[in-house]
């Protein structure tokens, strides 16, 4: 679909494997719920009061359904763990740079322009350094992940999927020649795999160099 659509897939947070994507760290979550209970006391009408009981949970669910991300691994060297978790033996890696990623996207309809940044890894059980009004400013919450994912060293591109959230994500048009510098074969790839990938690229008339993985037997 990347080559066919000339577009990059941004996945809604609710579809990602980490169930805590888009969920505030524990102490911040407690403050949000305490604020809800404080606001609940402003009203006497029980029909209004009950709306505050699960307000924070509803806000988080709605935000996860509307926020979409595209994720990249940042490192000068390859990671065997990242190959195993995200590509296996059938996938390839696309090599790019932060600058290339920042220049690869154009406006897409009415959706907010994607914002690129480094993920900040924190202890979700103790982190409490954001004010509630800051959570969604510049996608601050969406650039937080628990420190257990620190090995991913993620560069993340974030936008809002306002017009088709039911699709689970959004395809964003991209200048692939700008974005993709090299295609890296998996460590176990052989000559047949290289020919298959080259044939696929040729079928879409997409010119880019294909290289061996540095983790392949004998080195890259």
Image (cartoon, helix red, strand yellow):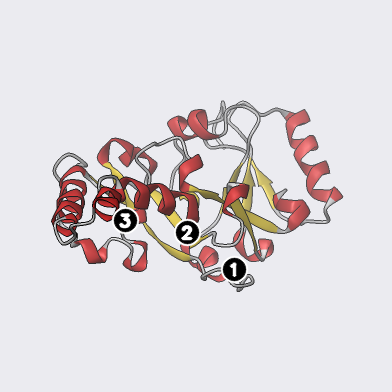
- State the residue in front, 139 or 64: 64
Residue 76's tag is: none
Question: Of marks 1 and 3, which one's residue comes earlier in the chain?
Answer: 1
Q: Position of residue 79 (x, y in %)?
A: 44, 36
Q: Is residue 204 visible?
A: yes
Residue 132: image quadrant is bottom left
Q: Nearer the viewer, mark 1 or mark 3?
A: 3
Compared with 60, 39 (above or below) is below
Pointer 1: what residue?
105
Compared with 37, 85 (above or below) is above
Q: Position of residue 195 (x, y in %)?
A: 80, 36
Residue 155: image quadrant is bottom left
Q: Residues within 10 Å of mark 3 (few under 14, many from 20)?
A: some
User: Callout 2: helix, strand or loop?
Assistant: strand
Pointer 3: what residue?
141
Residue 36: image quadrant is bottom left
Report the residue at 53% width, 37% height from top. 214
Answer with left or right where residue 194 lies relative to residue 154: right
Pointer 2: what residue?
157
Cα distance between the residues tagged 1 and 3 = 22 Å
Q: Is residue 73 visible?
A: no
Question: Of marks 3 and 2, which one's residue comes earlier in the chain?
Answer: 3
Report the residue at 60% width, 49% height from top. 166
Cα distance between the residues tagged 1 and 2 = 10 Å
In contact (CB < 8 Å): disc 1 and disc 2: yes
Q: Nearer the viewer, mark 3 or mark 2?
A: 3
């Amino acid at each position: 679909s990347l080559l066919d659509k000339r577009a990059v897939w941004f996945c809604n947070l609710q579809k990602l494997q980490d169930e805590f994507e888009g969920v505030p760290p524990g102490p911040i979550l407690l403050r949000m719920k305490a604020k809800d209970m404080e606001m609940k006391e402003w009203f006497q009408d029980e029909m209004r009061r009950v709306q505050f009981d699960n307000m924070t949970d509803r806000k988080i669910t709605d935000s996860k359904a509307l926020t979409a991300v595209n994720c990249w691994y940042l490192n000068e060297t390859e990671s065997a763990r990242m190959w195993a978790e995200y590509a296996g033996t059938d996938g390839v890696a696309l090599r790019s740079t932060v600058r290339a990623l920042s220049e690869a996207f154009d406006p897409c309809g009415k959706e907010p322009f994607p914002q690129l940044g480094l993920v900040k890894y924190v202890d979700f059980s103790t982190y409490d350094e954001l004010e509630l009004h800051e959570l969604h400013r510049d996608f601050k919450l969406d650039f937080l992940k628990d420190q257990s994912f620190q090995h991913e060293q993620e560069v993340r591109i974030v936008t809002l999927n306002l017009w088709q959230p039911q699709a689970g994500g959004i395809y964003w048009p991209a200048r692939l020649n700008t974005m993709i510098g090299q295609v890296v074969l998996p460590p176990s790839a052989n000559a047949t795999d290289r020919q298959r990938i080259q044939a696929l690229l040729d079928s879409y008339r997409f010119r880019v160099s294909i290289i061996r993985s540095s983790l392949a037997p004998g080195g890259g």
